[in-house]
Image: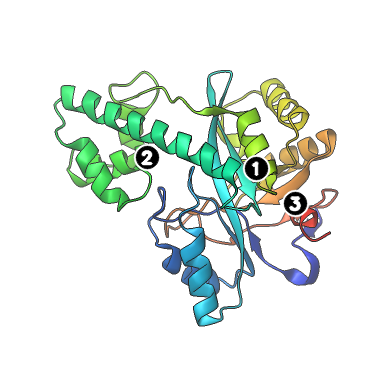
Amino acid sequence: MTEVLSDLRVIYDLHSHTTASDGELSPKELVERAIERQINVLAITDHDTTAAITPANDYIAEKNLPLTLISGVEISTLWENIEIHIVGLNIDINHNAMKALLSSQSQCRETRAIMIGERLEKAGISNAFEGAKALAHGGQVTRGHFARFLVNEGHVASVNKVFKRYLAKGKTGYVPPQWCSIGDAVTAIHEAGGVAVLAHPGRYGLSSKWLKRLTLYFKQLGGNAIEVAQCQQPPQEREQHAALAQLYGLKASLGSDFHRPCSWIELGRNLWLPSGVEPVWSLWQE
């Protein structure tokens, strides 16, 4: 299969996280790692917040670093009672529509986190909310922070086991989210001048029929692109997502979904697009 990295072999990574949400590197540390990994274009896409964009841009300017930063965000939405993530790329982080939506999302996150803490307290795990909030270092409190707290406190051996035992749907600490709709997210992204991307479509546990239904719905709402490539994917998934992009006339995006240094997910690793798709960056390079 022919690979399409980009024009002039530019290395793009359009999905990454910092300590502003559930990543473990600060904006400065993430930028430094991107430089070390020879990334040319990086999007920071924290969950329901753009707090990392300004400090990252300031650091790039201060050090005159050879890195183009794309202002982004990953918005949590609900569709058919399934949590679906929509990435916004090349957005105006100061646009009122975006600020209003993210403020509402932040309130939902805080309320949910408090409720998770209360449920874990009833299960005999004290101070979980306070512990998760401390690990967030002022950023958005996510289930990932609760998982790290439970591991650190010795309640469970690994983050994956935390979710299986406490935080997955139907478990003791699970609280149903109250996110915005896909339409709300796409509208805010567009009003902020950005591009709406259906994030990691292979992670929702959908059948082929339901994934097509989701992708068509996203397209009908004005969605622009779908994440085709990630650094770690099951066999054939990249080709399947490329086929969805072609079927519904969507651009193709790619990103590591980097959260922390680890052996299997890394900035820029194995990120290329199959032939026959049009890259999402063509939308802001026109």
SS state under label 2: loop
Residue 30 shows up from this direction? no
Question: Where, by quadrant of the figure, is residue 112 drawn?
Answer: top left
**Residue 115 pos. (x, y %):** 28, 26
Of marks 2 and 3, which one's residue comes earlier in the chain?
2
**Above/below status of 46 relative to 114:** below
SS state under label 1: helix
Residue 35 shows up from this direction? yes
- Is 101 left or right of 246, judged from the image as shown? left
Which residue corresponds to mark 1?
189
Question: How far is the residue under mark 1 from the one under mark 2?
Answer: 22 Å
Crowding near the residue tagged with mark 3, few <14, some 14–19, many ≥20 C-alpha atoms within 10 Å? many
**Residue 281 pos. (x, y %):** 75, 56
Q: Amino acid at mark 2?
A: Thr
User: Residue 280 shows which numbered tag?
Assistant: 3
- Is 278 left or right of 116, judged from the image as shown? right
User: Residue 142 shows which numbered tag?
Assistant: 2
Query: In this orientation, which residue lies closer to the viewer: 82 or 99?
Result: 99
Q: Amino acid at mark 3?
A: Val
Q: Residue at position x 65%, y 57% from top? A: 271
Q: Amino acid at mark 1?
A: Ile
User: Residue 76 shows which numbered tag?
Assistant: none
